[in-house]
Image (cartoon, rainbow, N blue to C red):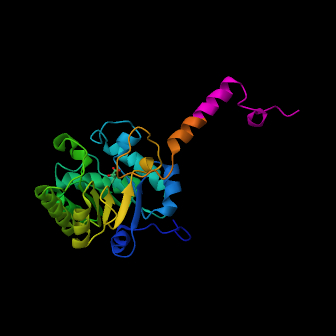
Amino acid sequence: MSTIGQPKRTTPAQIQAMKGTRPIVSLTAYTTPVARLLDPHCDLLLVGDSLGMVLYGMETTVGVTLEMMIAHGQGVMRGAQKACVIVDLPFGSYQESKEQAFRNAARILKETGCNGVKLEGGEEMAETVAFLTNRGVPVFGHIGLMPQLINTTGGYRSLGRSDKEADKIRQDAKAIAEAGAFAIVVEGTVEPLAREITQSIAVPTIGIGASAACDGQILVSDDMLGLFNDFKPRFVKHFAELAPTISKAAEAYAEEVKARTFPGPEHTFQVKK
Ligand code: KIV
């Protein structure tokens, strides 16, 4: 198959090389049409396991399956042309052993064609990250607040205020960077610590709730598009307000259907005489 004329997709190595050049722009994407819209503006699109909560209404990300990630990864790859596309390894698909992690990461790469996988974890996952990267799987790390650990950590709150917590996150960043991750998500971490980590490791930090001191930023796209009206965490900014726009469109549609003004003649097929 010829690739001549096709835009080149950004590689994990190129994302890594962006450290110190300009901030790296990333968003989550879960579907083809949204990926198509976000792709021209993003360096990296993450098919995050947040899709369990965002698209499927789950309470946490723990119930997300490998099959869900592969299906949405395929959808995003159909819509994205130039951004580096990374797919999350869901809870239970990599923690058991480095071999399990490789088997499932390889499935994701083969079945979606994406550029790499993301996994949550610090020092305890460093051996797995090295095992994957040494065998051809680019790994995006994820430290700080780790939503897959909700059942043992007990909640979503920003981290790094106590010396003990800060030391753990520092060690996690160092271990994952040295194990070969091409970049690391730093989630829910206080600014001074996020800045210190960013300055001390060789790979880019991509912050979510971790301040502008990081090498790049990521947000859940549905959050920043204003699709949820009920709760807005401090680190989220609405760059659009789609929830009221969608509600108003549904209301207008319902009124027109009830009034029989939709469909109109211009939406109706007739038999030509
Ligand atoms: O699952 C996800 O969307 C994520 C980002 C929030 C970093 O891990």
- Quick check: 252 left or right of 173? right
Q: Which residue occupies 36% across, 65% down?
A: 216
Left/right of residue 67 with respect to residue 97 in the rendered view: right
**Residue 245 in picture, x, y percent from top left:** 56, 41
> What is the number of callouts on the image?
0
Residue at the extreme top of the image, as rendered: 258
Left or right of 202 in this view: 78 = right
The residue under the point 34% across, 50% down is 234
Residue 264 in magenta stretch: yes
Choose between 97 and 194: the one closer to the eye.
194
Residue 95 showing in the rendered view? yes
Q: Is residue 190 above or below residue 263?
A: below
Q: Which residues are magenta?
A: 250-273
Figure check: 150 above or below 237:
above
Name, please, the residue furthest toward the right.
Answer: 273
Give yes or no for residue 140 being in the magenta stretch: no
